[in-house]
Image (cartoon, helix red, strand yellow):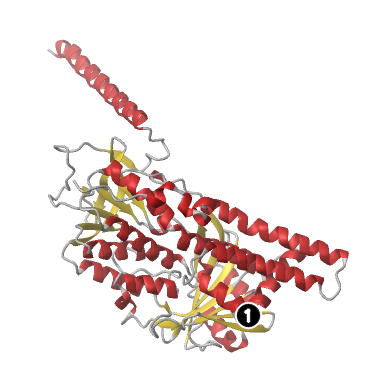
Amino acid sequence: MRKMADPYVLAWISVFVTTLLALCGVVLKRRKVNGISSSRTMSVTSVSAVDGECRSADGCDTDVIIVGAGVAGSALAHTLGKDGRRVHVIERDLSEPDRIVGELLQPGGYLKLIELGLEDCVEEIDAQQVFGYALFKDGKRTRLSYPLENFHSDVSGRSFHNGRFIQRMREKAASLPNVRLEQGVVTSLLEEKGTIRGVQYKTKDGRELTAFAPLTIVCDGCFSNLRRSLCNPQVDVPSCFVGLVLENCYLPYANHGHVILADPSPILFYPISSTEIRCLVDVPGQKVPSIANGEMANYLKTVVAPQVPLEIYDSFVAAVDKGNIRTMPNRSMPASPYPTPGALLMGDAFNMRHPLTGGGMTVALSDIVVLRDLLKPLRDLNDAPTLCKYLESFYTLRKPVASTINTLAGALYKVFCASPDQARKEMRQACFDYLSLGGVFSTGPISLLSGLNPRPLSLVLHFFAVAIYGVGRLLLPFPSPKRIWIGARLISGASGIIFPIIKAEGVRQMFFPATVPAYYRRAPPAN
């Protein structure tokens, strides 16, 4: 009997292997036809629609899936939910985050918060009003105030514990009956014929589930594991922040951010509660001194501490001795999306800039306002190709705010870092002196930094005004060949700083958005 059964067993095995190979061939051919490269399918899983329509495993219909409930995800969920959309938010960890960045919201970002109806999220978290910056260099100091004269007295920057702010945003979003907030890890996007239909995720209790919606918006932050499916990420890590909390410390200028132009790079101080001051020490490069063996504490005491203002020196040293030192890489990534039917990227998963200027949340909230206004006239989101074509205008309409803040953050960081090059030293000094002049020389740049004046051309004019001012300082009262040469290198260096950033942002979209066809795209007619 056993000998007679062997040929049948072998036959069944042969059929099984042949079928498996055939199925693999069909899948590979299908992906090739759809034109999705291997780099984009790393986190994409193919699915089939049921009766031509995608539905979630739990039977609930959803208009929008949002991956991530940080600042961008939570604000977006509340905004779309308030507009009547059925929103399913999937967040890796719903406990209160504990981060050392995302703690300063610029006035321009606060205005967007008001526009979205979320201004009460900075209440009851001991948030502090911020009215400007104080700049320190070589024993000199200058104060730069936000130009808030034409705004209501409540309009200013806000600084706070990042986790408290996010929890308030989550609570606000979850309070809407059509917003479902769930803890789970999204493992892949579900794709059918080149269109994203939803997500596959693992719940808190370990179950593998799928969720479907006409539109999936990925907001899973700077460490996104889904962005490679939707964009071409060019992530740069120019430096790391070392974070400390100073307790019961009084800054030289109350309710102001403090920037020390130290060697080798800037040091930041700003309040995050009524009793706590956040300190962020920038360390160039991707490698920082070890915390475990005491190298970091020694670095902070011997290199950094002598450069901080005397008023906060003792509190700084005490914070180092306390030992609660944390680090985080500073990432920069220009927006470089693949327009993908059924999906969209938002927040730090989509676009990042150096956090020196605290502009990340302002860009994210501004993007949400743009997206809300684009989606508002649409009743039906199910026509994925048409919706994708229409939402290409999002990438152009967001540029005035995003490109101004991104370019300023990248350029200012490079100018503020110390350098052995004499031309770079002169540019750094010229920037400090230019801002110290007051009037339009300080209000112009600070209005750009605060998000109150998102005009890329104004940014470029002020940047080169600083460079020309630096050359003028070199040539007066009597120019010499050496000074002329340094001045020429200063202009060349300034161009080398800002033009690559502008190129990455997109010259046409940044300065001439009206020439981009997507700028005029109108909402598709309702079915």
Asked whether 496 or 369 is in front, the reply is: 369
Q: Is residue 228 left or right of residue 138?
A: left
Q: Quadrant of the C terminus?
A: top left
Question: Which percent across, then down, holds residue 20?
Answer: 26, 24
Q: Quadrant of residue 362?
A: bottom left
Question: Which percent across, then down, holds residue 78?
Answer: 26, 65
- Quick one: SS at disc 1? strand
Q: Quadrant of the N terminus?
A: top left
Q: Residue at x 57, y 72 (%)?
A: 445
* Label 1 neighbour load within 10 Å: few <14, some 14-19, many 20+: many
Q: Is residue 100 left or right of residue 287?
A: left
Question: Which percent across, then down, holds residue 185?
Answer: 29, 54
Q: Give the answer, above or below, for where 400 lies relative to 268.
A: above
Instruction: Report whether residue 242 is seen.
Output: no
Instruction: Report whether residue 387 is seen.
Output: yes
Question: Which percent across, then down, holds residue 418?
Answer: 68, 68
Q: Give the answer, above or below, for where 60 lies relative to 365.
A: above
Q: Amino acid at mark 1?
A: Phe
Q: Give the answer, above or below, for where 401 lies relative to 151.
A: above
